[in-house]
C-alpha cells in the first residue's frame, strides 16, 4: 500500500508549531467572545429556557434540556474553556470541555442549527487531539508540558482541510440550476438592499444578482486553492476578507464572517507565524517528535476515516428521491450555506375524538417565533411538533388525530401546499427513510 | 494551470461586475427604479399619520362628550355618545396594524381592544373603586370593549340611561365610564404625539432591510395583526376554530353593541389600502408597486394581483354576512367558516409570499444567521 505510506509520511512531516498557535489563540478568543455575546444578548434565556418544547436531530432525541442552573453553568464552563484554549492552560481538558458543552448545547434544539455551529464542533473536536498548547501557552509556562518548535503536519493540514471543505462544499452546493441560471435566491435577497452606500443602486439590478451568484460560487470553489498556493495566497486572503465583510453587511449572519476571516490565517506560511510569535516563543528548542510507527499508523487511519466521512456525508442526499430543497433530506451538515429562500406557514388541526370536529392550534402557545419559523419549512420538525401536540392533547379516548395545512414558498416561486392535508401525522414516524407525506415539489 | 484559469475567471467576473456598475450609473433615471424612500414617505405621511390623526380626533371627541356627562344622563346623550363610540372604534381598526414604535411602547392595542371584556372585573372596579386601569389585572376591563359593555349593556337606550342614573351605583358607573374614556384618550394621545413629533422621520429614515427597519416592522406588525387579531380574534375564535367547531359568540368583538361586522369590514379595507398604499392624499406608492418592481410572482400571476384578488374573495364572503358576527356564527356558521378559509389564504399570501418577496425576516427574535 504505497499510497497509504505516502499519506502517512506526508501527515507526519515536521512543521513549525506557530500556525497552530495563531489558530489556537484566535479560535479560543473568538469562542470566548461569542459565548459572552450569546449570554449578553439574552439568548440563553430566550432560546433555551423560555421554550416549552425543543426540536431534536434524528438520533439525538435522548438529549434532555438541562435546568436553568445547569445551562448557565454550561455556558460558564464553555466561556472558561474557550479562554483556556486561547491561553493554552489545561489545554486538553479545556478542549474536551469546550467540545462537549458546545456540542451538547447545539443538540438541545435543532431549530437553531447553523452550519457554522457544526464547524465549531468539528474544529473543537479536532483540537482535542493536537498539541496546540506546546508553545506560547500557560501550560508550558507552568511546566505542565514541554515546549515544542514543531508539530506533525497533519495537525495543521487537518484544520486547513476542515476550512477547505466548508468553502469547497459550499461552492459545490451552489452548482445548481436555481443558483446559476436563475440567480436565485440572491435575486430576491439583494433587491431590497438599495440603501447600502455606493453600490446600493445596483442591488435591484438583475445583473448584480447574476454576478454575485457566479462570483460567490467561484469564490467558494477556488478559495481553498488560492489560499494553498503561495503565489495566490495574498489575493485569496484579500478576497476572503472582502467576501465575508461584504456578506456580513448584506445579511444578518452574526460573528461567523469574522470566524472565517481569522481562521483562514492558518494558511499563511509558517515563517510568518513564527515571526509574529518570535518575542513570546518559549525556548523553541529542537524537540524530536518520536511517535511510534504503530501510533502513526493509527493516527493515519483515524484521519482517513474522519475526513472520509466529512467528504462523503454531504452527498447522502443522493440516496433520497425528490427535490433536496423541498424535502431537506440530507440538507443539514453539508455546508449548504444561504442557498435558498424558503418561507412557510403551518397550521395544525387536532381531532381529539376521531370525528370531524377539530381545533386549530395557536403555534405561539407552544413555540417561540424562531422555532415556529424553522418548523414551518422543515418536514422532520413538522412531524416532531405534531407528535408533541398529540401528546399534549391526549384525552381519555387516546391520541388525537392531527393534520396540518402547511404552505411553503421556495425561492419566491409562490406558496404551495407542502404537507398532504389529510394525512394523520401521528401515524407517521421520523426516520431516515424517504418521506411519503409531503406533496410533490 | 487550473489555478490560473480560476484566477482569470475571478478577474473576469470582477471586471464584468465593474462594467455592470458603469452601465447602470448611466441609466440611473430609469423609470422602473423603485424608491423605498418614497414608499416609506407615502406610508408615513399619507397613511399612518392621517389615520392616527383621525383616531386622535375621534377619541378626543368621544372623550369630551363623556367627560361632560352629568346625572341625570339623557337618551340624547347616550345616543350621541354611542355614535361617537362607533366612529372612534371604526377609526381604531385602521390603526391596529401599526403596533410597533410608539404604539408598541404604549401597548396601544392591548389598552384599546382586548376582548372579550371581563364584566365581573368591570363591575368589581365600579363597586369597589380604587382601581388602577394600567395594571395587567384590568386589561379586560378597559378600552373600547369596556365602553362597549358600559354603553350597550342594554340595547335599549333608556335602560342605559337608567343604568347611569341609578340612585345607588349610577355615580360610580359614570365615573368608571369617564376613567376608561380618559385612559383610551391618553393612550392614543401619547402615540399620536410621537407620530406628530420625531417618530415620523424615524420611520421614514429607517429604510433598510434589517429586523428593525420600518418595512420589516410594519410587515411583521400587520402580519401579526391580521393573523392573530383579525383572522383569529374577530372570526376564528367566535366561529369555533379553537373549540372543536363549537361557536363562541360571546368572544366576538363589540359583543354588546353588535358592531362587529362593520368593524371587521373596516379592518379588512384598511389593510388592503395600507398594502396598496392608498391614503387620503394623492399618491399611492404601496407594497403592490414594490412587489411589481421586484417582479414577485405567485405561480404565473403577479403577487400583487394575487393578493388583491384574495381581498376580493374575502369581501365576497363578507358580503354574504348581514348580522353581527356573534349572530352569524350561530345562525350561519358555514358562511363564517367560508370567510375564515378566505382569510386563511390571505395569511399565507402575506406571511409567506409577501414577506419572502420583500426579504423581511418573519421573526420577532434576533439571532445568528448562517
Image: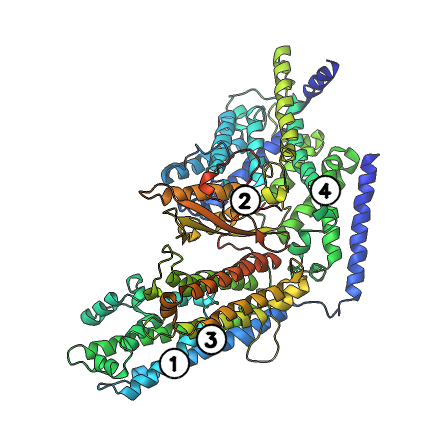
Same subunit, labels 2 and 1: the answer reads no
| Distance in Å between CA atoms under marks 4 and 1 | 62 Å
- With respect to residue A147, does A435 lie above or below? below
Q: Which residue is mark 2?
A: A378
The chain letter for the residue carrying disc 1 is B
| Distance in Å between CA atoms under marks 3 and 1 | 12 Å
Q: Residues within 10 Å of mark 2 (few under 14, many from 20)?
A: many
Q: Which residue is mark 4?
A: A175
The chain letter for the residue carrying disc 3 is B
Are dots 4 and 2 in contact, CB under 8 Å? no
Residue B52: assigned label: 3
| Distance in Å between CA atoms under marks 3 and 4 | 51 Å
Q: Which residue is mark 1?
A: B60
Q: Nearer the viewer, mark 3 or mark 4?
A: 4
Q: In the current view of this chain or complex, which residue is farthest to the top?
A: A293
Q: Nearer the viewer, residue B126 or B24?
A: B126
Compared across the picture, whether B38 is left or right of A406 comes to right
Are dots 2 and 1 in contact, CB under 8 Å? no
The chain letter for the residue carrying disc 4 is A
Q: Nearer the viewer, mark 2 or mark 3?
A: 2
Same subunit, labels 4 and 1: the answer reads no
Amino acid at each position: 500500500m504505497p499510497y497509504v505510506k505516502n499519506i502517512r509520511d506526508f501527515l507526519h512531516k515536521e512543521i513549525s508549531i506557530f500556525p497552530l498557535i495563531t489558530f489556537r489563540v484566535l479560535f479560543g478568543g473568538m469562542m470566548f467572545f461569542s459565548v459572552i455575546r450569546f449570554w449578553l444578548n439574552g439568548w440563553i434565556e430566550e432560546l433555551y429556557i423560555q421554550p416549552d418544547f425543543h426540536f431534536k436531530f434524528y438520533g439525538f432525541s435522548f438529549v434532555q434540556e438541562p435546568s436553568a442552573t445547569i445551562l448557565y453553568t454550561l455556558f460558564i464552563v464553555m466561556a472558561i474553556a474557550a479562554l483556556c484554549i486561547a491561553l493554552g492552560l489545561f489545554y486538553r481538558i479545556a478542549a474536551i470541555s469546550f467540545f462537549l458543552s458546545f456540542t451538547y448545547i447545539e443538540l438541545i434544539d435543532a431549530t437553531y442549527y447553523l452550519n457554522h455551529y457544526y464547524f465549531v464542533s468539528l474544529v473543537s473536536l479536532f483540537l482535542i487531539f493536537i498539541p496546540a498548547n506546546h508553545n506560547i501557552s500557560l501550560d508550558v509556562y507552568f511546566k505542565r508540558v514541554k515546549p515544542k518548535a514543531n508539530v506533525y503536519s497533519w495537525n495543521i493540514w487537518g484544520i486547513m482541510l476542515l476550512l477547505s471543505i466548508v468553502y469547497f462544499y459550499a461552492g459545490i452546493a451552489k452548482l445548481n440550476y436555481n443558483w446559476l441560471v436563475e440567480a436565485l435566491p440572491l435575486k430576491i435577497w439583494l433587491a431590497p438592499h438599495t440603501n447600502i452606500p455606493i453600490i446600493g443602486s445596483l442591488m435591484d439590478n438583475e445583473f448584480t444578482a447574476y454576478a454575485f451568484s457566479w462570483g460567490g460560487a467561484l469564490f467558494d470553489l477556488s478559495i481553498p486553492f488560492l489560499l494553498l498556493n503561495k503565489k495566490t495566497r495574498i489575493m485569496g486572503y484579500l478576497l476572503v476578507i472582502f467576501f465575508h465583510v461584504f456578506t456580513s453587511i448584506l445579511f444578518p449572519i452574526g460573528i461567523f464572517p469574522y470566524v472565517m476571516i481569522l481562521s483562514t490565517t492558518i494558511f499563511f506560511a509558517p515563517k510568518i507565524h513564527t515571526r509574529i510569535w518570535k518575542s513570546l516563543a518559549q525556548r523553541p528548542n529542537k524537540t524530536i517528535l518520536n511517535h511510534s510507527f504503530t501510533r502513526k499508523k493509527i493516527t493515519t487511519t483515524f484521519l482517513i476515516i474522519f475526513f472520509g466521512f466529512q467528504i462523503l456525508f454531504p452527498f447522502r442526499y443522493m440516496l433520497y428521491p425528490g427535490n433536496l430543497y423541498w424535502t431537506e433530506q440530507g440538507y443539514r451538515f453539508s455546508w449548504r450555506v444561504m442557498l435558498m429562500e424558503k418561507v412557510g406557514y403551518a397550521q395544525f388541526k387536532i381531532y381529539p375524538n376521531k370525528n370531524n370536529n377539530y381545533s386549530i392550534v395557536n403555534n405561539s402557545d407552544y413555540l417561540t417565533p424562531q422555532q415556529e419559523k424553522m418548523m414551518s419549512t422543515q418536514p422532520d420538525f413538522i412531524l416532531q411538533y405534531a407528535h408533541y401536540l398529540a401528546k399534549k392533547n391526549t384525552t381519555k379516548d387516546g391520541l388525537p388525530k392531527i393534520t396540518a395545512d402547511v404552505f411553503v414558498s421556495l425561492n419566491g416561486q409562490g406558496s404551495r401546499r407542502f404537507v398532504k392535508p389529510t394525512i394523520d401525522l401521528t401515524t407517521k414516524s421520523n426516520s431516515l427513510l424517504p418521506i411519503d407525506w409531503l406533496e410533490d415539489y | 494551470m487550473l489555478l490560473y484559469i480560476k484566477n482569470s475567471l475571478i478577474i473576469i467576473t470582477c471586471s464584468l461586475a465593474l462594467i455592470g456598475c458603469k452601465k447602470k450609473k448611466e441609466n440611473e433615471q430609469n423609470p422602473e427604479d423603485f424608491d423605498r424612500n418614497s414608499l416609506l414617505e407615502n406610508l408615513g405621511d399619507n397613511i399612518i399619520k392621517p389615520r392616527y390623526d383621525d383616531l386622535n380626533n375621534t377619541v378626543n371627541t368621544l372623550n369630551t362628550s363623556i367627560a361632560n356627562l352629568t346625572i341625570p344622563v339623557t337618551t340624547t346623550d347616550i345616543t350621541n355618545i354611542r355614535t361617537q363610540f362607533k366612529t372612534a372604534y371604526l377609526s381604531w381598526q385602521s390603526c391596529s396594524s401599526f403596533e410597533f414604535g410608539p404604539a408598541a411602547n404604549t401597548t396601544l392595542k392591548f389598552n384599546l381592544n382586548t376582548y372579550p371584556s371581563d364584566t365581573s372585573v368591570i363591575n368589581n372596579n365600579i363597586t369597589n373603586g380604587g382601581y388602577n386601569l394600567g395594571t395587567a389585572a384590568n386589561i379586560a376591563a378597559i378600552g373600547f370593549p369596556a365602553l362597549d359593555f358600559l354603553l350597550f349593556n342594554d340595547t335599549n337606550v333608556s335602560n342605559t340611561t337608567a343604568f347611569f342614573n341609578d340612585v345607588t351605583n349610577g355615580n360610580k358607573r359614570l365615573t368608571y365610564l369617564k376613567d376608561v374614556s380618559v385612559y383610551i384618550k391618553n393612550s392614543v394621545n401619547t402615540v399620536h404625539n410621537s407620530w406628530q413629533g420625531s417618530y415620523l422621520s424615524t420611520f421614514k429614515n429607517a429604510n433598510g432591510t434589517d429586523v428593525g427597519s420600518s418595512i420589516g416592522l410594519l410587515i411583521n406588525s400587520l402580519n401579526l395583526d391580521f393573523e392573530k387579531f383579525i383572522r383569529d380574534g374577530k372570526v376564528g375564535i367566535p366561529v369555533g376554530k379553537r373549540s372543536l367547531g363549537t361557536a363562541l359568540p360571546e368572544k366576538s368583538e363589540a359583543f354588546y353593541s353588535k358592531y362587529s361586522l362593520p368593524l371587521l369590514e373596516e379592518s379588512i379595507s384598511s389593510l388592503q389600502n395600507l398594502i396598496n398604499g392608498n391614503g387620503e392624499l394623492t399618491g399611492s406608492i404601496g407594497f403592490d408597486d414594490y412587489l411589481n418592481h421586484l417582479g414577485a410572482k405567485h405561480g404565473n400571476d403577479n403577487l400583487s394581483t394575487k393578493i388583491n384578488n384574495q381581498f376580493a374573495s374575502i369581501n365576497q364572503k363578507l358580503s354574504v354576512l348581514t348580522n353581527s358576527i356573534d349572530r352569524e356564527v350561530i345562525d350561519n356558521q358555514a358562511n363564517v367558516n367560508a370567510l375564515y378559509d378566505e382569510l386563511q389564504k390571505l395569511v399565507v399570501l402575506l406571511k409567506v409570499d409577501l414577506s419572502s418577496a420583500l426579504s423581511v425576516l418573519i421573526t420577532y427574535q434576533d439571532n445568528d444567521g448562517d
